[in-house]
Amino acid sequence: MLSALLGHDGFYSVVAEHAGRIVGSNFLDERSPIAGVGPITIDPEGQNRGVGGRLMQDVLNRAAGKQVAGVRLLQAGYHNRSLCLYTKLGFITREPISVLQGRPLGRTFAGYNVRQATMADLAACKKICLQVHGFDRSGELRDAIEQSTAAVVEHLGCITGYTTGVAFFGHSVALTNQDLMALIGAATEFGGPGFLLPTRNHEAFKWCLEGGLRLVFQMTLMTVGLYNDPAGAYMPSVLY
C-alpha cells in the first residue's frame, strides 16, 4: 500500500529519521480541494517523543503552502494521545465514524441499479459530491475508475450516488440513504478492516447491523479549514 502512495503524484510523503534510521512516516492526499492526512506510522520505540507531532506539522505546513481549502483525517477512537495532539494542532472534532466488516450483504432495492462506474460518469458524480459536501473528489474517483473499484447507483434514470469502493480506503457519496444502502448492498467485499459509516446515520447503521455486519472499532472525523455539514448521505475513507 505504501509503495502505491509513494509512487503516486497526488500524494505528498515525508519520513522522520533518527540516528540514520527511519522512525516514522506520514502522507498527504492532494488529489482534491480538501487534503487528507495519513496513514501516519511511528516506530514503537519513537512514540511519545514528539515524532508524530513533527510529522503532522510537516504535512500541515505543506497544506498551508499549497493553500488548500481544508485538511481532514480519521483518528482512531481508542487512541487518546493522538486525539489530544490533533486537537492542539487545530483539528476540530466533527463526528464519530463506525468501521463495519462482515460478509457481503447481497441486497438489492427495487428501482435502484448499481453498476461499475466509467469516465463518462465523472460529471454527474462531481455534481453529487458538490451538492452533498460543497467540493468535489473527482481526482480520487478517476483513480478508482481506472482501478475498476468505483460504482454508481442509478434511480429513475439518473445517477444518485457513487462509491470509489465500499472499503477502508474508499469513500461514497449519495443523495439519500436508500442510494447509499444500495451501494453497500451491492458490494462484493469490504476491503481492509472494513468500510466507514457515520455513526449518527441511524437508519443505515441499524440496517447494516441487522444485515449481520459487525462493528470493528470507532474512529473520529476531524477537520481544519473548510467544513460543511453534509447535505446528503456519505461514507468517508480512512483519509476523510
Image (cartoon, rainbow, N blue to C red):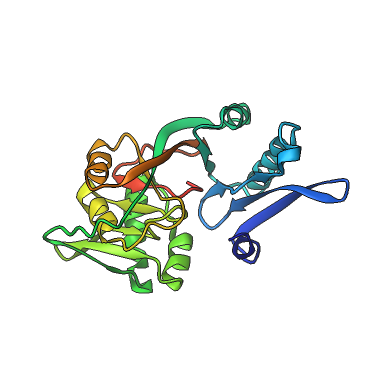
63, above or below 143, in the image:
above
Picture layout, residue 191 above or below residue 96: below
Q: Is residue 130 left or right of residue 177?
A: right
Q: Is 29 situated above or below 158?
A: above
- Which image quarter: residue 145? bottom left
**Image quadrant where residue 98 sits:** top left
Whole-percent x and y of residue 151? 33, 65
**At 32% from the left edge and 63% from the top edge, which residue is drawn?**
188
Which residue extends farthest right? 19
Looking at this rendering, what residue extends furthest in the left direction?
110
Question: Is residue 204 shown left or right of residue 240?
Answer: left
Give coordinates of residue 90: x percent, y percent: 59, 30
The residue positioned 51% from the left and 32% from the top of the image is 78
Q: Residue at x 88, y 46 (%)?
A: 19
Along the line of sight, which residue is nearer the eye, 114 or 119? 114
Residue 65: x percent and y percent? 67, 47
Towards the viewer: 231 or 18:
18
Percent x, y for residue 158?
Answer: 20, 63
Q: Count all numbered tags in the image, as a single digit.
A: 0
Return the residue nearer the eye: 24 or 89: 24
